[in-house]
Image (cartoon, rainbow, N blue to C red):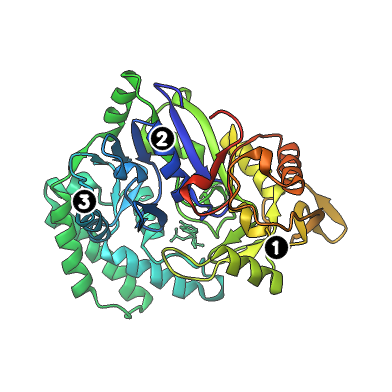
């Protein structure tokens, strides 16, 4: 947590690693908390003062009066959903307008982007990505095509720009023959959201953040989704549409690579995935159901069942490499309390070929496991490493050795106090 540096907190598998819980543990140590990629496809569940919040676009530092929060240029923002999220926080007593700065370069998710998301998914049929339906892909597509609307556009000539892009989208939908939508209600709320957004600090956040760094402030870049959903490094095409990895911190906030400090990589003691796409460790049996049930693995945004499996060290090794992870954070270890044997995927097999590095396409590869003894005792009430059962210590040591990266923080229950530091962070 060096002054004048940006530390990154990244989910390094398929998202849903429990960032919401640790970010709340991390934020007191930082002056600024910034989101650099993604949008309302994220759902960071945070319990604060006994109340549960699901943050989608707003950084998790918002609960802490002294923090500056930034939605960076790499993010996409849906004004109507932002308004709902912000109002809920305001009603609960957290004031935002003085503590939240939104990049003028962030792109706007239009109501028609959400319709396009559905239309493209429907057109893909069995090859659908299983998106969150929040319009993420179409918005980033328009950004790359250089026809998108940015937050800064709502300050000048907005109506004309909006009408032009909407017309273009409606033409695409008409060409596709997609008629399953009713824009009127969605659009009215969205326009209200645009008005609401105007009362916020809409600024060049790259300047704000670099000024803070020059003043010696510490910044936490709060990741969304997970590394294997990265548009470049994930399991393409079953990915999200932004750079969710460490490189995205630089481009999504406008900070130079030499400003990055530590990179915290979060993962669960087992694996989950939402939506479609290859998942070599997926369990289709009662063990998978048990992991889902004990781990409450149901989506925060869509409510969908998460696909569950054992931990995947091949995927983790890859994610550590592309992110430059300095510290691992292992979540939900207690979910494994009742398993006599814990399986660990150390390689992938296809026919008679065995590899221990991530292939270009993980489809068709199956997991090769090593079996470790479970600890078969509840660990959620433990708060010191010295009290951990030996089999749990062995599990930690096995992962650290295999990944050649230290696990610095470990979580053994949903409680806030159950986040245990194993080495200085
Ligand atoms: P999109 O980001 O809505 O386009 O969805 C693309 C893929 O990423 C789908 O498989 C989603 O389920 C997945 N996804 C997007 N956001 C999250 C997240 O925050 N957690 C887990 N999966 C996500």
How packed mark 1 is, by other alpha carbons closer than 10 Å (few <14, some 14-19, many 20 or more), is: some
- Which residue is at a point 68% across and 65% down the rendered structure image? 282
Q: Nearer the viewer, residue 304 or 238?
A: 304
Could you say where residue 309 lies in the image, as x and y percent from the top left?
A: 67, 62
> Tags 1 and 2 in contact by the CB under 8 Å rule?
no
Q: Nearer the viewer, residue 342 or 302?
A: 342
Numbered label tally:
3
Give the image quarter of residue 397. Answer: top right
In the image, is the residue at mark 3 within 8 Å of ligand 1 by its beta carbon? no
Report helix, strand or loop for mark 1.
Answer: loop
Report the residue marked by disc 1.
338
In the image, is the residue at mark 2 within 8 Å of ligand 1 by its beta carbon? no
- Which residue is at a point 28% across and 69% down the rendered structure image? 171
Q: CA distance from mark 1 to mark 3?
A: 40 Å
Task: Identify the disc placed on residue 220.
Answer: 2
Could you say where residue 53 lies in the image, as x and y percent from the top left?
A: 35, 57
Could you say where residue 249 lies in the image, as x and y percent from the top left?
A: 44, 37
246 over 190 or under it: above or below: above
Counting residues from the start of the chain, the first of labels 3 and 2 encountered is 3
Q: Is residue 227 left or right of residue 312?
A: left
Report the residue marked by disc 3.
93
Counting residues from the start of the chain, the first of labels 1 and 2 encountered is 2
């Amino acid at each position: 947590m060096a002054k004048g540096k940006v530390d990154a907190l990244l989910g390094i598998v398929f998202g849903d690693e429990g960032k919401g819980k640790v970010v709340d543990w991390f934020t007191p140590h930082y002056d600024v908390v910034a989101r650099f990629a993604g949008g309302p496809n994220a759902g960071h569940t945070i319990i604060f003062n006994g109340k549960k919040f699901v943050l989608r676009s707003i950084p998790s530092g918002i609960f802490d009066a002294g923090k500056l929060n930034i939605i960076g240029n790499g993010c996409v923002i849906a004004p109507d959903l932002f308004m709902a999220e912000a109002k809920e926080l305001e009603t609960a007593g957290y004031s935002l307008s003085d503590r939240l700065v939104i990049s003028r370069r962030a792109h706007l998710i239009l109501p028609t982007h959400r319709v396009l998301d559905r239309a493209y998914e429907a057109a893909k049929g069995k090859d659908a990505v299983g998106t969150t339906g929040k319009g993420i892909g179409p918005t980033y597509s328009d950004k790359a095509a250089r026809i998108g609307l940015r937050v800064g556009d709502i300050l000048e000539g907005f109506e004309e720009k909006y009408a032009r892009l909407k017309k273009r989208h409606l033409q695409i939908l008409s060409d596709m023959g997609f008629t399953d939508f009713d824009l009127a209600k969605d659009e009215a709320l969205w326009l209200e959201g645009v008005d609401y957004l105007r009362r916020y600090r809409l600024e060049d956040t790259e300047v704000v953040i670099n000024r803070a760094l020059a003043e010696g402030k510490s910044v936490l870049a709060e990741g969304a989704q997970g590394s294997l959903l990265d548009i470049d490094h994930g399991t393409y095409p079953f990915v999200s549409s932004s750079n969710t990895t460490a490189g995205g911190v630089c481009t999504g906030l406008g900070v130079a690579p030499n400003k990055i400090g530590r990179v915290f990589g979060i993962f669960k003691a087992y694996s989950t995935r939402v939506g479609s796409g290859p998942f070599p460790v997926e369990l289709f049996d009662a063990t998978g159901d048990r992991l889902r049930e004990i781990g409450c693995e149901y989506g925060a945004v869509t409510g969908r069942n998460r696909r569950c499996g054992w931990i995947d060290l091949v995927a983790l090794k890859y994610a550590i490499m592309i992110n430059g992870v300095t510290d691992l954070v292992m979540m939900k270890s207690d979910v494994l309390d009742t398993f006599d044997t814990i399986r660990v995927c150390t390689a992938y097999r296809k026919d008679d070929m065995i590899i221990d590095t991530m292939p270009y396409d993980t489809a068709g590869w199956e997991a090769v496991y090593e079996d470790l003894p479970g600890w078969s005792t509840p660990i959620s009430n433990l708060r010191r490493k010295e009290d951990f059962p030996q089999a749990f210590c062995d599990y930690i040591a096995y992962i650290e050795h295999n990944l050649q990266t230290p696990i610095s923080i470990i979580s053994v229950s949903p409680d806030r106090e159950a986040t245990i530091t194993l080495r200085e962070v």
